[in-house]
Every structure is written in structure tokens, then in C-alpha cells.
Amino acid sequence: MTRPGRPTIRDVARAAGVSKGAVSFALNGRPGVADETRQRILEAAHALGWTPSHRARALSASRAFAVGLVITRPPELLGADPFFPAFIAGVERTLSDRGQALVLQVVPDSAEETSYRRLAADGRVDGVFLLDLRVNDPRIALLEQLQMPTVTIARPDVPSSYPALLVDDQPGIAAAVTHLVELGHSRIAHVAGPRHFLHGYVRRLAWERTLADAGLPTHMCVESDFSAAGGAQATRALLDQVDPPTAIVYANDLMAIAGLSVALEYGINVPGQLSVTGFDNTELAGYVSPPLTTVRTDPFGWGRTAAHALLDLIDGGPAGDIPTPPAQLVVRASTAPPPPPARRHRRPGARPPHPSRSEKT
């Protein structure tokens, strides 16, 4: 190499005494180059300090070598809820291993469709992850119209040609409710996620069905937003009832931990007077007081697996659904048998739940 600057394929070809085409074939692992020649090319590239140009690679292959993730949650929730950083970390781990990048966009609901259309029109990504599936999710049809390779996190409840990471929240919630029933609880409430999110709806349905199968009432459900503030507000609505629950199943750990704080504020002993369960088994769940009984999931592993599946799909690989290990209940100290009726919590001035804060299902 006689000129300064970053070495190019032309420099490698000159040093190895071959054509640029042979260098391209050798460096990309394609057939058509003799083993001895391939080895000579690789040694020349190493000696020159040659590294691939992402820009040139993308232009030559008509590829962005990037995938997209559009999230419509409030930005402050992304930092507070450990699910999102863990999932994104898993995605990034796989992408970095395979020389890809992640384009992350956090947008309001009103800009979501525009974001997908812009990503497709600008060629900024080769495919996307579809997270936070909705009930009757309209984005499936939009992405199919845009011909955008996609992997969905969970199987949608509408027809979809895309592979899905088979995440199923129902067994985890059912296990939590069954655990409480076996302890002797009969007044088991649920602090649910938004019903327009498929996972919020599915977790709520699993709670309801498991109680119904046990012959227990299913009217104590308060819908929240997966945030700590929302979980605290929902907990107050339940504990202010004339006959409050003896156990609460929360749709995520963040709301459950907020619920523990409200119980402390109300002077309610957990688990002596109130049992609490969460969902996700976040790191903090094992360190609160009392340690939280919750459902173990694997968002980091989901991110890694989803990224492999999407990159394989972009490369023309199989488009089948991808199984995931089942969620498991982790029993800790926040659950116990219910107290005798004489010891159940009654707040002074307790009132029936306000219609806007609690609803029958």
C-alpha cells in the first residue's frame, strides 16, 4: 500500500496478487476461491489492518445492516421498567456479534405508523421487532403492506405471516393464582395492565379463568398502566374497599413493589394480612421487604433469540415460530395463608370502590 489512510479491498488485492473480486469472495466467506488463495488474502488483510467498511458493505448489498424497534411507551417508563433495558440488551448482544445495528425510536401513539413508514421508505432498517402487541393489532397489516421483515414478541391474535417468539404469559399468572388459592385465599384481586395491550389482556384473562375454575369471585380487578404510580393508585383503590382482598396479583413487578409500599403506608402487614405477587422477576424483586413472590421471565434471552430469528429471516432463512422456555413461579416471602377474619384489614372510613378506579369483568 503506497498511499496513506484506511486500507481498501484494492490494497488487499494488490498485496495478495489477486483480483478485487477474489478478495470480496474470500472476505465474505463465499465459494469460488481456492483454500490457499483464501488464506493468502486473509493474511494480507490482517497484515494491512483492513476492516470492513459498513457503509460500503451496505451500498454493495443494498442492505442497511440495521434493524428497528419502535416503542410507544412514555420515555420515563422505559427507564423505570427493567423489562425494556433487558430486552434491548439481549437484542444488542446478538446484533453486535453479527455486525448489525439497532435503530430505536420512542414515539407517541400518534406517530407510530409514520415511524414504520419512514423506516421502510428510507431503507434505514432491513426488518423490525414488534413489541407490545395490541389486541387486534393493526400494525401486522401495516408491516405486511410495507413488506417489512418482522418478528413479533408473542403470537398476535390476528392473522400474521410473521414468525413469533412464543411468549405465553398465561401459565405464569395461573401459577400465581393457584399458589394463592392453595394457601387458602378466596378474595384475590388483580392489578392489570392496559387491556389494549395483548399481554395485559392475556394476564387478566388468565387471572379470571383460574379464579373461575376454582369457583372464586372475579370482580376485584383494577386496570392500571404498568407504572409504579399506577400500581400504587390501583392498590389504594382495592384496599379502600369495604371488604378488601387478602391477596393481589400484579401484572408486573414494578406495580407490585409500589403495592408493597402502599401496604406499608396503610399499616398492613405483608404477608400477614395481605399477600402480593408480581410478574417478571426483576432483580429488585428479591431485595425488597419482604422479597417478592413473582413469575420468572427472560427478556434478555428473548431479545437474543428474537434478534437471531429476525436476522435469519432477513437473510432468507425459515420463518417459523420460535418456542421459549415456560415462565416459572418464584415463591418468596410476600405470600402466606390469609389471616383469620378477625384480623383482616379494615381501614377507618373504607368505602366501596369508585367506578372510575375499579370495574367488574
Image (cartoon, rainbow, N blue to C red):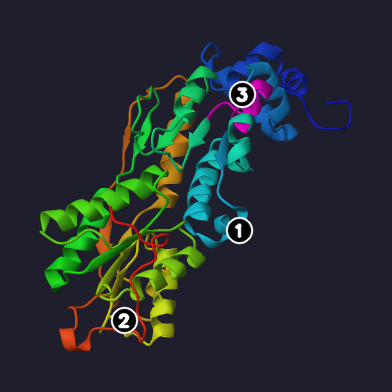
Above or below — where is 149 with respect to 285?
A: above
> Tag 2: residue type?
Val
In the figure, 183 relative to 357: above or below? below
Left or right: residue 140 versus residue 112 is left
Which residue is under mark 2?
A: 270
Give yes or no for residue 1 being in the magenta stretch. Answer: no
- How many numbered discs? 3
Q: Work out which quarter of the rendered image holds the N terminus and state it.
A: top right
Q: In this view, does 52 lie above or below 222?
A: above
Q: Do the residues labelled 1 and 3 touch (CB within 8 Å)?
A: no
Q: Is residue 217 left or right of residue 205?
A: left
Q: Where is residue 141 in the image (x, y as percent from the top left)?
A: 46, 23
Specify which label sits upstream in the sequence, 2 or 3.
Answer: 3
Residue visible at 48% across and 63% down in the picture: 230
User: In this orientation, does residue 189 appear?
Assistant: yes
Give amino acid for label 3.
Ala
Q: Mark 3 points at which residue?
A: 120
Q: In this view, does 126 lie to the left or right of 325?
A: right
Mark 1 or 3, which is nearer the eye?
Answer: 1
Residue placed most toward the observer, 312 or 138: 138
Q: Using the rendered view, name the quadrant where residue 269 is placed.
A: bottom left
Disc 1 marks a residue whose amino acid type is: Glu
Query: Residue 279 placed where, x, y %?
Result: 35, 60
- Report crowding for label 1: few under 14, some 14 to 19, many 20 or more residues within 10 A (C-alpha): few
Q: What element carries label 3?
A: helix
Q: Earlier in the sequence, mark 1 or mark 2?
A: 1
Residue 350 x/y as whole percent: 35, 80
Residue range (magenta): 115-127
